[in-house]
């Protein structure tokens, strides 16, 4: 594909900025999309890719900057308007109507179709669109029975039927098989050849090199580079993506590795992850690195008994352990702090003290089963002081706290459970730099006190700075464990993206 | 296997098994009860089924959108009583006008339900539990005698209840049955060939996607309740024609039978799943089983409710445990996309 | 979130205002209204419903619902009456009735907590099914002639002017208040109602709590059914039909969100008093029972509709203010 510099861009994002509370999600970012190009957008998690897409499709509104369609400024205030402008997006999890058939899924949200459904015409139209995509699919089949890839195809067909001009594909391949990815790609190329502009987001380097015409890289909400594919090398791309300064991070102080706490052998869960082998020692931070879809969180959930593993053994403090529920995990001394503070982490309308004591509530009950308020308050006070949680009182509902303070409440909740092994899932996501440093300080302290810490993080510099060893995962597989000495950002990123030491079966 | 999967999916399993069950019930009781295949039981079942079916079809529209209407029993009772009263005061009223009055009264109550639920954002459970009581109390508060008797009616009402349109060897198709069949056909067509009907499914199937796609959710839910009310009004008219003697307790608790029919017929309480034929078959099966058991075991009428409750639970449990598991199997063996292949690809390029 | 509690407080104060208004109206209508016997009578007439309202508060705060309470009341009473009819000692009958309540609760709880069906459907089926079983037991008979002490329990004052059922209610109210507002169990009820996932991720055994609640609901409903039998002196298959409506109204009117997680027994206590006084007042005006039920139904709808409308108006208001601010800012920029 010749780069279409001569043509005018369909969609231009001009100097877009967007801020959420304390984080600058996008900082003066510009991006041009030309007709008939597949434009890959790369960046670490949190680089601002999703925010940009959500601005394009009208979910968010930019604080600054403007969007131009065919050179004219437009305002996109919701997804319906975006569709009217010819901008559509498909995601990892397609938004389909499972009870409607394929053809209906394509056409049901169309306006001005008249009150009657002409099934034959609709089936034919649906078949035409699918044929245009070079795909064979039974249009009478209910969408519930379709594979994920087929559902995505239906969504693409829907976008085509709405005369899409800009199609965003947000990590569409992360749950697809190799074969299905190939199908999706030939489909994307067809669309490109029909003049559609495709913004393609993926973490898989080989995919980007296979399909992209141009590659844009974001880092920390900033635009870094836009280059024709021919001028991009994997090393260069990785360097651009990870080129953050590590100095701003609190580095883990060297602690002596203590006794073996837990060893995991061949931990597997069907269709999720398989063959994990690692050890956790006292006083050590074991980092879990990987990209979206690497299934690190699932490993954490398995160790905490929420989604127990199918096979493999866990030896905890010398004894074999079977972990089937969070209660069992807590009894053993394993705690898991979720990445999803809002939905799984804290009861937002309830007070700081209530949230902190929740997992250990039994210890705060009198003989009659009544809550000892003073003990609860004391615990609240203690942690507010120890982790310097800034709040009017321990009775303040956590919803009123800033993200950083909420995070510290969640940490307190699990520290109060006095675990041996503490699994921290994205402990600094969405909190400001100051709070981040504090959290790092706390992690450091905990390790020094002899806890074994598993740190799951998508923040590469954080993982590099805080971990004694780094386990890299990719699509449910363990790609290797790097010691602090041998780990570099490039090495870890390469492993996470499946460069170099790709396992044979997926090559 | 491919074409089998195309036309036969887990949702339809319920309908097929219902037909199978109905046939099995027929055969079993036919061998147990002498004279079972006589027209009497047939005529009796069809008249009752007719009323339940009409109301169940309305309820199904509401269930499809992930809502409930618990007030249909009260709507049926109130319209039956109200129209019965009017007829006894004005015996000269045109039959068509009486019918329209019933449907209109029902629709009006449906409008009230729909306004509170779709636009007032009151959960449908709460709203219709409230209107269930309100409509019933309106019936009780209706001035005058607390009873309507057959003798008050003009002759055509009685005729409508007893004559048969077509009679084949004693098997009658009564007007109420014809009306029910007509309603069934109309709504089967509406839910198949009208955009509105399909949108009912869309909303219940994935409300999130419906919102993102810009479907007018409030409007669709509102009209579902209006239609449900109108059909309950029609059911009220049929109830009056069928039973003649009415008290203030007319059709009390019918909402439960109606929901039972829908749920047994495979209409999901989670929305998006269910057909008119399912509601019809569900109503038919429940009534047939009730009547047959009554005759066979000589058990009292009192078993009927105990039995209904069990049937609902069974249907829902089957849905939760078996059908969802089947769906997983279906999904795993689901179709694959077959692109034209790389050859075609290069042609296009 | 402080604002939410303020709103709740204001909801409760609104209830208080309504209560005072209703009582004031009643006093004007009937000078004897505040006399102790009338006040006791007021409670006594609906004592079973307000006892069930206590456990229903727990269940709705837990983000579930139990529509089968009225049927369980009927079934338990009928079990007792059925056995009594066949010459079984009343004590055994009472035990069997309470056991029936537990059994029903275990069944409901199992279906909800372990099979994973929605409580609405399960208890709707229960509403029909348990009532059906009650009809099966008594058919169309009315069973009475219970032992004198049993009837007196429901009808005669036990201590001073106060009958047994009322004492039972106040004892249970205190226990419920302590459990819901002060115990670990109560904390779990709120936590699960707020966010089931957070509870599970914190090692709370969500299923066991839900199970316990449904069993308690079955047991307490059975107990209420027995009280009703004692008060009426007889039992029929359709006794206590439609109780669920009044009970749910009391709870929702009391400021308990139907989506769970918020509300308190204090609010429910206020709304209980409103419903009781309202019914009594309507009785004074010779409004028949079924119409009273209609008013309760309207009250139920209004108790959800009014806050919704208020919220809508408030958000409309703030949106308009924001729009004005933006406009002003743009004008400033332009000027």
Image: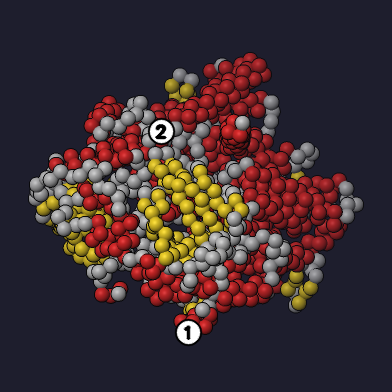
Identified at 55% across, 61% down, the residue is: A9
Mark 1 vs mark 2, CA separation in Å: 60 Å
Q: How is the image coloured?
A: secondary structure
Report the disc number at residue A21: none
Does label 2 lie on the same chain as label 1? no
- Nearer to me, C69 or A158: A158
Residue linked to disc 1 = B343
How crowded pointer 2 is (Cα within 10 Å; few <14, some 14-19, many 20+) is rated as some
- Would residue A314 be found to the left or right of residue C81 on screen? left
Q: Nearer the viewer, residue B243 or C333?
A: C333
**Which element carries disc 2, helix, strand or loop?**
helix
* Residue in front for this viewpoint, C322 or C304: C322
- Residue under the image location 65 percent in, 34 percent down: C295
Estimate the x, y position of residue C215 in percent, counting from the top left.
Answer: 39, 45
* Residue at the spot of label 2: A400
SS assignment at label 1: helix
Residue A212: tell me if it is visible.
yes
Q: Position of residue A336 (x, y in %)?
A: 27, 48
Chain designation of label 1: B
- State if disc 2 and disc 1 touch (CB < 8 Å): no
Tag in front: 1 or 2: 1
Residue B182, percent across and down? 74, 66
In the displayed orientation, state which residue is furthest to the top.
C31
In the figure, is residue B240 to the left or right of C104? Answer: right
């Amino acid at each position: 594909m010749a780069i279409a510099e001569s043509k005018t861009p369909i969609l231009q994002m001009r100097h877009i900025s967007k801020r959420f509370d304390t984080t600058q999600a996008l900082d003066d970012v510009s991006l041009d999309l030309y007709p008939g190009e597949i434009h890959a957008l790369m960046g670490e998690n949190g680089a601002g890719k999703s925010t940009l897409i959500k601005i394009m499709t009208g979910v968010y509104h930019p604080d600054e900057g403007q969007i131009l369609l065919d050179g004219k400024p437009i305002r996109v205030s919701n997804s319906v308007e975006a569709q009217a402008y010819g901008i559509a997006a498909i995601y990892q999890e397609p938004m389909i109507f499972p009870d409607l058939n394929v053809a209906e899924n394509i056409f049901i949200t169309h306006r001005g179709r008249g009150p009657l459904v002409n099934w034959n015409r609709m089936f034919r139209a649906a078949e035409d669109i699918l044929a245009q995509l070079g795909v064979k699919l039974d249009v009478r089949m209910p969408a519930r029975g379709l594979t994920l890839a087929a559902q995505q195809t239906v969504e693409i067909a829907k976008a085509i039927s709405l005369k899409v001009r800009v199609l965003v594909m947000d990590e569409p391949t992360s749950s697809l098989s190799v074969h299905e990815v190939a199908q999706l790609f030939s489909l994307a190329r067809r669309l490109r050849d029909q003049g559609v502009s495709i913004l393609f987001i993926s973490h898989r380097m080989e995919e980007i090199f296979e399909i992209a015409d141009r590659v844009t890289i974001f880092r920390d909400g900033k635009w870094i580079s836009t280059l024709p594919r021919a001028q991009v090398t994997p090393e260069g791309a990785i360097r651009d993506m990870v080129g953050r300064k590590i100095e701003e991070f609190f580095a883990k102080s060297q602690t002596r590795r203590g006794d073996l706490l837990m060893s995991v052998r061949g931990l597997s869960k069907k269709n999720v992850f398989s063959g994990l082998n690692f050890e956790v020692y006292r006083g050590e931070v074991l980092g879990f690195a990987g990209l979206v879809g690497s299934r690190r969180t699932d490993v954490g959930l398995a160790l905490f008994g929420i989604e127990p593993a199918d096979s493999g053994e866990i030896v905890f403090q010398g004894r074999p352990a079977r972990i089937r529920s969070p209660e069992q995990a807590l009894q053993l001394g394993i705690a898991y702090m979720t990445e999803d503070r809002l939905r799984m982490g804290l009861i937002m309308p309830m007070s700081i003290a209530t949230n902190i004591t929740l997992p250990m509530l039994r210890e705060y009950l009198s003989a009659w089963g009544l809550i000892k308020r003073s003990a609860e308050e004391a615990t609240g006070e203690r942690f507010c002081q120890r982790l310097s949680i800034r709040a009017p009182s321990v009775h303040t509902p956590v919803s009123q706290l800033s993200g950083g303070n909420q995070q510290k409440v969640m940490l307190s909740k699990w520290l109060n459970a006095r675990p041996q092994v503490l699994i921290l899932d994205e402990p600094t996501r969405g909190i400001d730099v100051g709070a981040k440093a504090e959290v790092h300080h706390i992690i450091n302290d905990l390790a020094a006190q002899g806890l074994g810490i598993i740190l799951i993080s998508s923040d590469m510099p954080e993982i590099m700075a805080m971990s004694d060893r780094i386990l890299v995962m990719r699509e449910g597989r363990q790609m290797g464990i790097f010691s602090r000495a041998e780990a570099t950002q490039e090495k870890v990123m390469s492993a996470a993206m499946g460069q170099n030491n790709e396992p044979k079966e997926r090559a | 296997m491919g074409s089998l999967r195309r036309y036969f999916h887990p949702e339809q399993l319920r309908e097929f098994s219902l037909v199978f069950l109905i046939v099995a019930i027929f055969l079993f009781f036919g061998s147990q009860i002498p004279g079972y295949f006589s027209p009497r039981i047939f005529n009796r079942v069809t008249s009752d089924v007719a009323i339940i079916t009409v109301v169940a079809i309305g309820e199904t529209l509401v269930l499809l959108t992930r809502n409930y209407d618990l007030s249909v029993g009260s709507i049926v009772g109130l319209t039956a009583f109200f129209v019965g009263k009017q007829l006894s005061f004005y015996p000269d009223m045109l039959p068509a006008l009486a019918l329209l009055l019933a449907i209109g009264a029902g629709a009006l109550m449906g409008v009230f339900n729909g306004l509170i639920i779709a636009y007032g954002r009151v959960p449908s459970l709460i709203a219709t539990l409230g209107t269930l009581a309100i409509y019933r109390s309106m019936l009780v508060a209706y001035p005058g005698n607390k009873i309507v008797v057959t003798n008050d009616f003009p002759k055509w009402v009685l005729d409508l209840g007893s004559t048969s349109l077509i009679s084949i060897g004693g098997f009658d198709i009564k007007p109420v049955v014809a009306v029910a069949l007509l309603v069934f056909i109309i709504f089967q067509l509406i839910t198949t060939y009208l955009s509105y009907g399909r949108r009912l499914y869309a909303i219940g199937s994935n409300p999130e996607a419906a919102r993102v796609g810009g479907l007018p959710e409030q409007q669709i839910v509102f009209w579902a309740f209006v239609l449900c009310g109108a059909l309950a009004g029609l059911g009220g008219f049929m109830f009056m024609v069928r039973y003649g003697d009415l008290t203030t307790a007319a059709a009390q608790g019918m909402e439960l039978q109606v929901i039972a029919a829908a749920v047994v017929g495979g209409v999901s309480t989670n929305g998006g799943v269910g057909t008119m034929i399912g509601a019809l078959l569900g109503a038919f099966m429940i009534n047939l089983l009730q009547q047959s058991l009554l005759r066979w075991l000589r058990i009292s009428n009192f078993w009927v409710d105990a039995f209904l409750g069990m049937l609902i639970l069974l249907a829902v449990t089957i849905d939760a445990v078996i059908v969802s598991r089947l769906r997983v199997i279906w999904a795993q063996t689901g179709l694959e996309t077959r692109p034209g292949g790389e050859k075609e690809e290069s042609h296009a390029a | 979130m402080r604002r939410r509690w303020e709103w709740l407080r204001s909801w409760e104060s609104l209830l208080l205002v309504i209560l005072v208004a209703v009582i004031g109206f009643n006093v004007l209508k009937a000078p004897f209204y505040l006399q102790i016997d009338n006040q006791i009578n007021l409670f006594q007439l609906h004592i079973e419903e307000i006892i069930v309202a206590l456990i229903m508060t727990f269940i709705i705060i837990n983000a579930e619902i139990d529509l089968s309470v009225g049927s369980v009341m009927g079934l338990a009473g009928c079990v007792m009456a059925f056995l009594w009819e066949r010459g079984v000692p009343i004590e055994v009958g009472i035990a069997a009735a309470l056991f029936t309540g537990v059994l029903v609760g275990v069944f409901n709880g199992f279906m909800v907590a372990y099979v994973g069906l929605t409580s609405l459907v399960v208890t709707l089926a229960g509403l029909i099914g348990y009532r059906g079983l009650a009809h099966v037991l008594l058919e169309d008979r009315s069973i009475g002639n219970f032992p004198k002490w049993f009837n007196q329990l429901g009808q005669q004052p036990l201590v001073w002017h106060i009958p047994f059922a009322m004492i039972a209610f106040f004892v249970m109210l205190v226990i419920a208040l302590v459990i819901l507002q002060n115990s670990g169990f109560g904390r779990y009820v709120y936590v699960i109602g707020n966010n089931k996932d957070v509870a599970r991720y914190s090692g709370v055994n969500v299923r066991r709590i839900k199970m316990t609640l449904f069993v308690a609901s079955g047991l307490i409903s059975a107990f209420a059914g027995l009280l009703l039998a004692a008060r009426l002196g007889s039992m029929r298959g359709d006794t206590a039909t439609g109780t669920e409506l009044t009970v749910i109204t009391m709870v929702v009117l009391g400021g308990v969100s139907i989506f769970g997680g918020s509300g308190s027994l204090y609010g429910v206590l206020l709304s209980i008093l409103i419903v009781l006084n309202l019914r009594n007042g309507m009785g004074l005006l010779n409004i028949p029972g079924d119409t009273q039920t209609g008013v309760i139904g309207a009250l139920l709808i209004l108790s959800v509709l009014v806050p919704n409308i208020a919220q809508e108006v408030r958000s409309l208001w703030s949106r308009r203010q924001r729009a004005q601010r933006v406009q002003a800012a743009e004008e400033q920029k332009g000027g």
